[in-house]
Image (cartoon, rainbow, N blue to C red):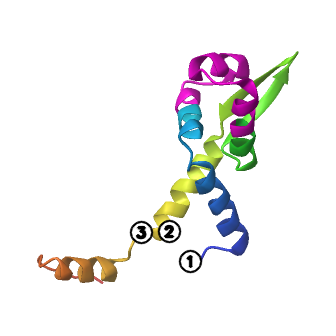
Amino acid sequence: MPVSAKASEEALQMFRALGDETRLRLLQRLRGGEQCVCDLTDELETRQSLLSFHLRTLKEAGLVTDRREGRWVYYALNPGALQTMRRLLEELKPGLRALRVLRLARGERPLAPSPR
């Protein structure tokens, strides 16, 4: 099934957000659960203004959620976004015919045809 224009734009925004080492490190830190921006600043040894920029990028891409408690903001991974990315990547997997062609190009034995 082809990806809609909206889904394609969402995917682009998500994958662009992943194209930065600091943002990947932030996502790694959030794997353990929700964290305060103050703790993330200390852990990543970076300025809060720069960290806020990266967190905003991740939030706009839908990869993280946030909530305010008093003067602090807490961030967490958005599991729905990760599922969306997994689905989009699954849609990009080559079909059986493409895999057969690839195996032949590598000089490997072709896959047995699937029973119908």
In the rendered structure, the answer to whether residue 82 lies left or right of residue 116 reads right
Residues at badges 1 and 2 in contact (C-beta under 8 Å)?
yes
- Which badge, 1 or 2, comes first in the chain's sequence? 1
Please give the residue where the numbered disc 3 appears in the rendered image.
93
Q: Label 2 is placed on what type of residue?
A: Glu
Residue 112, visible in the rendered structure: no
Q: Is residue 38 magenta?
A: yes
Across and down, in percent, residue 89 comes to 49, 61
Rounded to the nearest angstrom, the CA distance separating label 2 from label 3 is 6 Å
Rounded to the nearest angstrom, the CA distance separating label 1 from label 2 is 8 Å
63 lies above or below 97:
above
Residue 99, visible in the rendered structure: yes
Q: Residue at x 76, y 29 (%)?
A: 49
Please give the residue where the numbered disc 1 appears in the rendered image.
1
Q: Label 3 is placed on what type of residue?
A: Lys
Q: Is residue 16 magenta?
A: no
Q: Which residues are magenta?
A: 28-54
Please give the residue where the numbered disc 2 appears in the rendered image.
91
Across and down, in percent, residue 4 comes to 68, 74
Across and down, in percent, residue 39 comes to 66, 16
- Which badge, 3 or 1, comes first in the chain's sequence? 1
Between label 3 and label 1, give the one nearer the viewer. 3
Q: Quadrant of residue 8?
A: bottom right
